[in-house]
Image (cartoon, coloured by chain):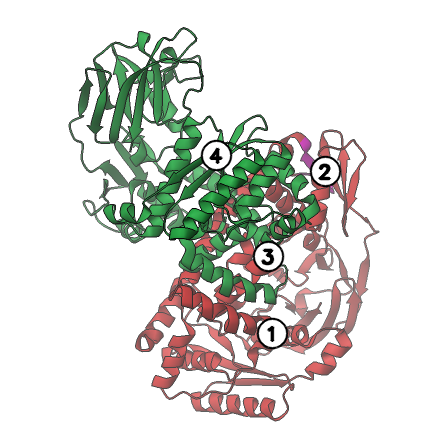
Chain colours: A green, B red
C-alpha cells in the first residue's frame, strides 16, 4: 500500500536499527525509480541526508542526462549533493577487470570516502525485497551454503538497505501517487546481465506458480537468516572443541574431528580460515585416515597429519619487517598497502570517521615513527575506551579471520602504539580541543 | 556417464546406508523411465528385490497398458510382483480428498502393507536429483524454513531413494545404452501440476543462466542438509535452557526467552510442538510483554503468562479411557484407531516387521487384555533389548512430538505391557521356536 510506505519505512529503520535518527545518511542515487523514491522518503521522514551520484560515463549522453537529473533532484529536495565522474572503461582496462567489477569497486570506494569525509554515519542503497530474493535465488542456482541463501542484508558494516522490506510495485505506486519522476536505472550495471535474466525469466514464472512468490521467498530468506545464527552458535561450540592454538600452530585432534557430525560442514568451517578451498577440505579429511607426515598446503598454511593431531602452521615465518618514518610528509609503501602522511593545521569540524584515516595530535607524537606488524604482548588504549587493552584481545573482538590477523600492522611513537593501522587509533593521541597541529595518516590498501 | 551408473548406484546405497545388501527391497515401479531403470539397476547389481505397481485406474486403457507393461518387466527381470487396482476416484470422493492426495495416500499405505507382509526391509522410489531440486525450489517459492530446503531425503523411515545421486539425463542415456523401454510416466500424478510447471518453466531458464544449475542446486541442498543438523544441535541446547516439565505442565522462563537469539525461530521451534501456528507463535511472543493471565490457546494446549513464566498445559485432561478385550478375535475401535485381533497357527517364516502389526506368543498371553493410554511409571522390555525400560524414556528415544506422545496406547496382559501399540512389542511375548499359536494384532489408524 503506497500510502503506508512512509510509515513502514520509518518503522523498518527503527526495528532494524539501521541508523540513529540524529545521524547523517549518504544516499546512493542513480536517478532510477528505486533510489529516487528512497531520496523522497528520507526527505519526507525528516532524516538528515545527502545524495551521492556516480557517473560511470559508460552511456555517453544518457550518463550526462542521469547526472543532470540527480543534480535537479538534490536541488528540489534541498539536500547536499556529491557527484563524481569515473573513466570506468580506462580503469577497468588498467586493472584488468570487467566493466562490472570496475564500476562496483569505484562506486563503493568513492561512497565510503564521501561518507567518511562528509560526516555521514552510513551509506544507504535502494535495494528492495525482490533484489534480495533474486540474490538468494542466483546463489542457490550457482551453488552455495547457508550464508548464500540469506539474500541481501539490511545492514553490513557501513552500508544500509532501508527499502528491503518493500516490493518494487509499492515503490512504483508511491512514485505515481506523488508524481515522482525518474530516469531509466543504470545503477545495476554492476551485475546487470545475470540479474536481469533472473528478473525477466525466473521471477515471472515463479510468480505464476505462486502469486505471492516474492513475499514468500522473502519470508524464507528471513527464516534462513535466523537459522544461520543457530548454525553459527553450534559451529562456535565445535570450534572450541576442535581447534586449539599453541604459539603459531593450530591443532585439531583427529579422533574428535572424525566423530564430529556433520563432518563435511564442520571441516569446511574449521579449515576455510586457513584458506582451504572446498577441494582442499576434502584432502584434509583424507588426512584423517593417513599416516603421519601426509600434508595439504594452502596459499598460506601447511596442514599436516602428526600422529593423533592435525597441525596447522603458517607457510612462511618471514623476518618481521619494519619501516621507519622520519618526517610527517610523503608516501610510504609497505606490505599491507600505502600510507600517506601529512601535517595539517587543526580547524574545528569533522574528524574523519573512516578507520582508514588516522588524525593524531602532533603534540603527542615524536618522530621517527615505527611501522611494524603487531606481536603478542602488544597493547594500546583503543579510542573511546578509557582502559588499556591487549591487542590480541582487541583483534579477537574485531572478529578478524586468521589470515587477516596475520596482516595487522601498528604504528609506534616512542614505543607506544598510536594506531592499529586501518582499525583504531590510540585514545592518548586523539584530537582534542587543545590540538593545534594534526598528523594525518591515510591507508590505501 | 551412463557406463558408470551401476557403480555409482551401488556406492551411493553403501555410503548412505540405504539398506543392507542382504535385505529384500520393494521397488515402487510405475512403468515410467525412472522406475524402470531403477528396477534394471537393482537386478544388475544383484540385490534381492520385488516390484510393486499401483494401477490408479485414472486413465482407462493407458492404466491397463502400464500395468501390463510392469507385469512383463517383472517377468523379464524374474522379480516377484505385487499389483493392485485402486478405485482412486471413488476413494477420493468418499474421503473428500483431491485425486492427488487420495492417490498418494493409497499408494504409500499399500506399499507399506506389502513391505511389512512381504518381508521387505524398505520401499525404494525412483526420485532423482532433479526431483529433489524441484522440491526444494517449490518450497522456497511457497515459503519455508531451513527444513523445506533440504529437498528429498535419501532415507526416511522405511522409504529409500537410491537414484537421488543422479541426473535424469544419465537415466535416459543408460536406458538407451541398454535398450530399456518404458511407458509414459504416470507416477507423478500425486503432485503433477505444480511440479510439472517447475520442470518445464523454471528449471530450463535456470539451466540457461547456469549450465550446471541442477547439480549446483543439489550441492546447495546437501550443504543445507548439513546446516540443518547444526541448527538442530543449537536448538537442542536452547530447548534444554528454556523448556522445563513438571507433571503435565511445561514451563518457559520469560526473561531467558526474551534474551534468546534468534528469538523468532527459537520461539517457533519451542511452541510448534504444542500445535502453535506461526501466527500463534507471534501471539505467544506478545505474552512476553503482557501481564499475568493473558493466554493463547492452540488446538491442544493453553499457553498462559504467569508472572515470570509461560506455562503450557494440555487443554483437556479427560478421564483415561480403557478397553477390555475378552477374546482373540474381532475388531476393536478405540480413540487411536482400529485393532484387528485374531489367532493363528504358527508356521515358520517371516514375522511381520511393521510396527503396526504385533505377533505375540499365545502361550504367554492371558485374557482379558486391557487397552489403555500409557502413563508415567509404565515400563516394558522392548523387543530386541534384554533390559527393562521406562516407557517415558522409550518415547523420548522415539522422538515423538508432544501430541504424538499424548496419543500412545499400550496393551496389557496380567498387568504386564505386551505391546506399545503401533510401536514395539515386549520381548517376553515374542514369537520363538517353541511358539505354537500366535495372537496377531493389527493397528489401522
Give the residue at mark 3. Answer: B382
Q: Quadrant of residue B6?
A: bottom left
Residue A78, given in percent of the width and then of the height, sits at: 56, 33
**Residue at x 61% of width, y 49% of height:** A171
Give the residue at mark 1. Answer: B193
| Residue A390 visible somewhere in the drawing | yes
Give the residue at mark 2. Answer: B286
On the same chain, marks 3 and 4? The answer is no
What chain does badge 3 belong to? Answer: B
On the same chain, marks 4 and 1? The answer is no
What chain does badge 2 belong to? Answer: B
Give the residue at mark 4. Answer: A81
Q: Is disc 3 in contact with disc 4, using a CB cutoff of under 8 Å?
A: no
What distance separates the C-alpha of mark 3 from that of mark 4?
Answer: 77 Å
What distance separates the C-alpha of mark 4 from that of mark 1?
Answer: 53 Å
What distance separates the C-alpha of mark 4 from that of mark 2?
Answer: 44 Å
What distance separates the C-alpha of mark 2 from that of mark 3?
Answer: 43 Å
Looking at the image, residue B58 lies above or below residue B424: below
Q: Nearer the viewer, residue B386 or A309?
A: A309
In terms of secondary structure, where does tag 1 sit? helix
Amino acid at each position: 500500500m503506497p500510502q503506508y510506505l512512509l510509515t513502514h519505512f520509518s518503522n523498518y529503520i527503527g526495528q532494524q536499527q539501521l541508523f540513529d535518527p540524529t545521524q547523517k545518511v549518504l544516499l546512493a542515487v542513480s536517478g532510477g525509480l528505486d533510489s529516487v523514491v528512497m531520496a523522497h522518503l528520507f526527505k519526507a521522514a525528516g532524516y538528515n541526508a545527502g545524495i551521492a551520484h556516480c557517473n560511470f560515463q559508460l552511456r555517453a549522453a544518457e550518463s550526462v542526462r542521469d547526472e543532470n537529473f540527480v543534480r535537479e533532484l538534490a536541488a528540489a529536495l534541498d539536500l547536499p549533493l556529491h557527484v563524481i565522474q569515473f573513466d570506468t572503461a580506462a580503469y577497468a582496462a588498467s586493472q584488468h577487470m570487467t566493466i562490472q567489477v570496475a564500476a562496483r569497486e569505484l562506486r563503493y570506494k568513492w561512497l565510503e570516502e564521501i561518507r567518511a569525509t562528509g560526516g555521514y554515519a552510513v551509506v544507504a542503497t535502494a535495494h528492495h525485497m525482490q533484489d534480495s530474493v533474486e540474490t538468494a535465488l542466483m546463489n542457490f542456482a550457482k551453488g552455495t551454503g547457508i550464508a548464500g541463501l540469506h539474500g541481501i542484508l539490511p545492514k553490513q558494516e557501513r552500508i544500509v538497505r532501508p527499502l528491503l522490506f518493500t516490493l518494487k510495485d509499492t515503490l512504483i505506486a508511491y512514485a505515481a501517487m506523488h508524481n515522482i519522476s525518474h530516469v531509466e536505472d543504470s545503477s545495476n550495471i554492476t551485475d546487470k546481465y545475470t540479474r536481469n535474466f533472473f528478473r525477466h525469466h525466473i521471477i515471472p514464472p515463479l510468480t505464476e506458480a505462486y502469486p505471492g512468490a516474492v513475499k514468500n521467498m522473502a519470508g524464507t530468506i528471513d527464516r534462513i537468516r535466523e537459522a544461520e545464527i543457530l548454525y553459527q552458535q553450534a559451529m562456535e561450540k565445535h570450534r572450541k572443541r576442535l581447534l586449539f592454538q599453541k604459539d603459531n600452530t593450530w591443532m585439531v585432534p583427529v579422533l574428535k574431528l572424525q566423530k564430529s557430525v556433520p563432518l563435511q560442514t564442520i571441516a569446511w568451517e574449521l579449515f576455510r580460515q586457513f584458506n582451504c578451498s572446498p577441494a582442499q577440505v576434502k584432502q584434509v579429511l583424507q588426512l584423517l585416515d593417513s599416516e603421519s607426515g601426509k600434508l595439504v598446503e594452502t596459499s598460506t598454511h601447511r596442514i599436516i597429519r602428526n600422529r593423533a593431531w592435525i597441525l596447522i602452521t603458517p607457510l612462511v615465518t618471514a623476518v618481521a619487517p619494519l619501516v621507519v618514518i622520519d618526517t610527517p610528509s610523503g608516501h610510504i609503501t609497505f606490505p599491507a598497502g600505502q600510507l600517506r602522511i601529512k601535517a595539517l593545521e587543526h580547524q574545528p569540524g569533522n574528524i574523519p570517521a573512516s578507520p582508514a584515516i588516522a588524525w593524531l595530535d602532533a603534540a603527542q607524537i615524536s618522530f621517527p615513527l615505527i611501522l611494524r606488524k603487531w606481536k603478542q604482548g602488544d597493547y594500546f588504549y583503543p579510542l573511546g575506551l578509557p582502559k588499556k587493552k591487549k591487542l590480541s584481545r582487541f583483534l579477537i573482538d574485531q572478529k578478524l579471520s586468521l589470515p587477516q590477523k596475520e596482516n595487522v600492522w601498528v604504528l609506534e611513537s616512542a614505543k607506544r602504539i598510536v594506531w592499529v593501522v586501518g582499525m583504531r587509533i590510540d585514545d592518548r593521541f586523539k584530537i582534542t580541543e587543545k590540538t593545534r597541529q594534526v598528523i594525518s595518516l591515510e591507508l590505501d590498501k
